[in-house]
Image (tube, rainbow, N blue to C red):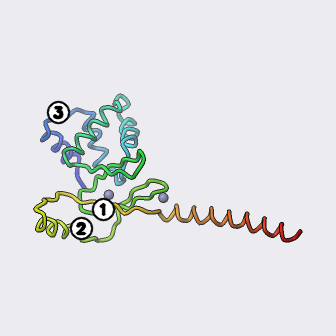
Amino acid sequence: MLTTRDYLNALQSGGYRITDQRRAVCDFLARTPTHPTPSQVYAQVSESHPEISRATVYNTLNALRDLGAIVEISVGGDHTHYDTNPEPHVNLVCLRCGQVVDYAGDVPLAALYEIVHAQTGFQAVSAQVQMVGFCAECQARKRDEIRRQLQASTTFLREETKR
Ligand SMILES: [Zn+2]
Ligand SMILES: [Zn+2]
């Protein structure tokens, strides 16, 4: 995980002045274990910095993204998340609730760097694999919905056959 200092260094190397507000955004990114959306970052940071504007937060996030310090993940629709984990890893993206979590197991993604580099000359600095599907909670919710629908239709059938 990157520290507040790492993010500030990235901003400085990009020619950005360090302000209290940019520092607050960097602080939040260094502490969050999640994959926040831009508005989540704004909501959290504005709790301690009520004067901060949405534009400042979004501009800082865009700058950090352009500098490669955070990675933008689009999961369809307007769902943009920022990944603060610089290690090569697999993101599990739920298509239903939109949550993004890191898969904790070991995946030899770093080994891919060498293969890709040998074949194409491409120098990778980061790799995220998006695995899309349905999280356990959403699957359970879906099963409940199907069960309820089935119950409703079998009740209907029983009523029908009684006649
Ligand atoms: Zn879900
Ligand atoms: Zn991730």
Residue assigned mark 3: 17
Classify mark 2: residues with Cα within 10 Å, few (<14), some (14-19) or many (20+): some
Question: Looking at the image, which residue is at 28% across and 63% down?
Answer: 89
Which quadrant of the figure contains the C terminus? bottom right
Q: To which quarter of the image does residue 65 belong? A: top left
Image x and y of residue 46, in percent: 38, 35
- Kind of element beneath mark 3: loop
- The residue under the point 72% across, 66% down is 151
Residue 144 position, x and y percent, is 62, 64
Give, as a three-letter code, the residue at label 2. Answer: Leu
Q: Which residue is mark 1?
A: 129
Residue 45 position in % (x across, y down): 35, 38
Residue 8 higher or lower than 55, as above or below: below
Above or below residue 6? Residue 56 is above
Q: Viewer-proximal residue, 2 or 77? A: 77
Disc 1 packing (10 Å; few <14; some 14–19; many ≥20) = some
Q: Tell me: 9 left or right of 127.
A: left
Residue contact between numbered discs 1 and 3, judged by CB atoms under 8 Å: no
Name the residue type under label 3: Arg
Give the number of the disc on residue 109.
2
Q: CA distance from mark 1 to mark 3?
A: 33 Å
Task: Label 1: state its secondary structure.
Answer: strand
Tell me which amino acid carries mark 1. Answer: Val
Give the mark, 3 or 2, whose residue is nearer the N terminus: 3
Q: Earlier along the polypeptide chain: callout 1 or callout 3?
A: 3
